[in-house]
Image: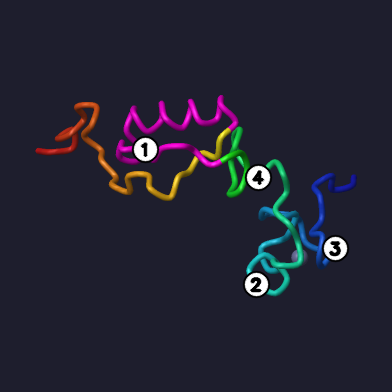
Amino acid sequence: MTDARPTCRHCLKCVVSKPRGLCWACHRNMSVRELYAVAPHCVHGPGAGSGSGTPPVRPCPHPQGSPGRLDTMSRRAVAGESLWHPGDCREITADVDGRAGHYAA
Ligand SMILES: [Zn+2]
C-alpha cells in the first residue's frame, strides 16, 4: 500500500507537514523556506494578504476583536478594499461585548 500523503517539495522525502508544501525540517530552514511561495490556500478570506485590494479610505476606530472591527473588515472585503489600514486602532479589547469578567472569580 502506498502512502498517498504529499512529499516535501524540497527534500522530496519527508511528508508535508507545514505550509508551502514543505516538511517540518525544510520549513524550519529559513533559506529553504524563502525558495517556496506560500500556497494560495494558506491565504484566508477575501482580501487577505498584504497589498490586495485598494487601501481603505478611513482607518477603523474599533479595537481588534470587537464587533465593530469585524463589521469594518467585512465591509472592506465586500468593497474589494484591503482589510488593513495603517491607521487602524491597535488596541485589543476583550470586553467590548460585555464578556469582561467572564473568567473573574
Ligand atoms: Zn523537506
Name the residue nearer the viewer: 10 or 84.
84
Image coords of residue 68 (percent x, y) = 34, 28
Q: Which residue lies furthest to the right in this view?
A: 1
The quarter of the rendered structure image containing the N terminus is top right
Q: State the residue position of label 3.
A: 12
> Which residue carries the number 4 mark?
42
Residue hosting label 2 = 30
The residues tagged by marks 3 and 1 sit, at their Cα atoms, a distance apart of 45 Å
**Which of the two marks, 4 or 1, is nearer to us in this view?**
1
Residue linked to disc 1: 60
User: How far apart are the two marked residues, 4 and 2, measured between alpha carbons?
Assistant: 18 Å
> What's the CA distance linking mark 3 and mark 4?
21 Å
**Mark with earlier residue (4, 2):** 2
Query: Under tag 2, what secondary structure?
Result: helix
Question: Between 21 and 89, which is closer to the camera in this rendering?
Answer: 89
Judge whether residue 95 is colored magenta. no
Q: Which three-letter amino acid code belongs to the residue tagged 2?
A: Met
Q: Which of 61 and 35 is in front in this view?
A: 61
Ligand 1 contact, mark 3 (Cβ < 8 Å) = yes
